[in-house]
Amino acid sequence: MIENKNPEKLQVPDIPYPAHGGDPRAIAQIAGIDPDKLIDFSASINPISPPGCVSQLLLETPRLLREYPDPHCSIIAKNISAAIGAPEDWIRVTNGSTEMIYLLPHLLNKGQEVAILDPCFSEYEKAFTAFGVQPRSVPLRAKTGFQADPSLLFSQLDSIQQLGAIVFGNPTSPTGKLYSDFLPHLQGYCEGRNVILIIDEAFIDFSSPDNSAWNLLKKNSNLILIRSLTKFYSLPGLRIGYGILHPKKILKIAPHQYPWSVNALAQAVGAEVISDKAFQEKTRDWTLRERGFMFKALSSIRQIEIFPSDANFFLLRIRGNGAPASLYQHLLSQSLLIRNCGNFRGLDQSFFRISLREREDNQKLVDSISEYFSSRKT
């Protein structure tokens, strides 16, 4: 273990866990911490600087601000099509993947229900509930490593009489687990019941593209893929995402999307970064290396359980009778912010998610967690 070069601890007040990750300045203000020194592990954003083309495009901001954005997102849709091999008329660009999530309920009929395989991104439940569609949680259990057993899962789904859609992550947040082998079975089930299958692939770019469900989409018009450009390309402030879905479904949701919801700068940047293969390869190599380092390092701390991940983050659980809030406060006192996952269905406050950052930051987090549990022995 390397020596912690910044052993400074701050006395911070007890603060409630935020609903999402990625709001470090608000947490710093509440905790009385210098926001410029807070290291944010709570948001799963690529720590590598955005592709080089972004700096050049930012110089064009004055021109882009004087023009209305393209309401059809034509250039970025064309570039996404070329980059991933999906037909252009199957792509709908949105203000982050979250906007697409809130458009999806318009595909269901009144009285239908949606099954959400939990734990899952909380905005799905909020979106469907807001539109009067009843969400039904189908939990995948930590004790089985969040495995999806078709024989058990499908019997649970059979009990939902008015099932209209199923929501699933690949890899899912916050577990980081891929379900490539299971997806064909789930697709077959959905085809048999004429149910829409929504697969959230916001983190698929951190894995191999071969793990995407795109090949299944070619065979099933009831399959929808949700993608994000903000996480992989380190652009969360621009809000840019897209859905891949049958053109008939796009026609159904399009009237409900606000005009000009994707700003001109987001379109211009997104259209360029999606084609940057060098950046993609660099990020995947980096992710594989840091993921291996962190998994090995954290696995050596016996008081926590770390779940294998194929994304740029890990789900952790404090074993036994540990004190989650105490760990959170300890790390915050060292200007380290992690994401408590107690508000995910199927999890409790003993679960945390940590994103990958550069090696120095990752090592500091490992050392601080180790220090916390070592100090509790005495």
Image (spheres, rainbow, N blue to C red):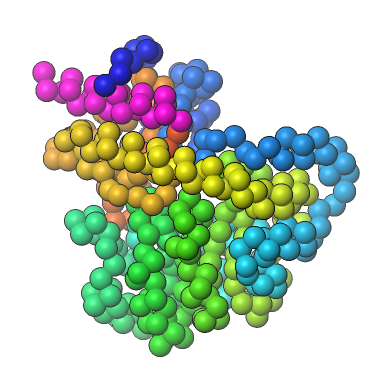
Residue at image location 61% in from the left, 63% down from the top? 84
- Looking at the picture, how far across and down is residue 259, in whole percent? 76, 60
- Could you tell whether 292 is left or right of 237 in the image? left
Q: Is residue 44 visible?
A: no
Residue farthest toward the bottom in the current orientation of the protein? 192
Query: Which residue: 55% across, 35% down?
Result: 48
Q: Which residues are drawn in magenta?
A: 358-378
**Position in image of residue 311 (x %, y %):** 42, 49
Q: Is residue 215 something that shows in the picture? A: yes
Give the prevailing secondary structure in the magenta stretch. Answer: helix
Q: Quadrant of residue 83?
A: bottom right
**In the image, what residue occupies the spot 35% across and 26% down?**
363
Q: From the viewer's perspective, is residue 27 above or below residue 98?
A: above
Residue 273 or 254: which is nearer the viewer?
A: 273
Q: Is residue 109 above or below residue 232?
A: below
Residue 260 percent coordinates (x, y): 77, 57
The tally of labels here is 0
Give the quadrant of residue 104.
bottom right
Q: Nearer the viewer, residue 277 or 164?
A: 277
Residue displayed at 40% across by 57% down: 172
Is-magenta flag for residue 368?
A: yes
The N terminus sits in image quarter: top left
Between 67 and 45, the one lying in front of the other is: 45
Q: Quadrant of the C terminus?
A: top left
Q: State the image quarter where residue 159 is shown.
A: bottom left
Q: Position of residue 277 (x, y in %)?
A: 61, 50
Q: Residue furthest left?
A: 378
For residue 370: magenta? yes
Q: Is residue 333 left or right of residue 24?
A: left
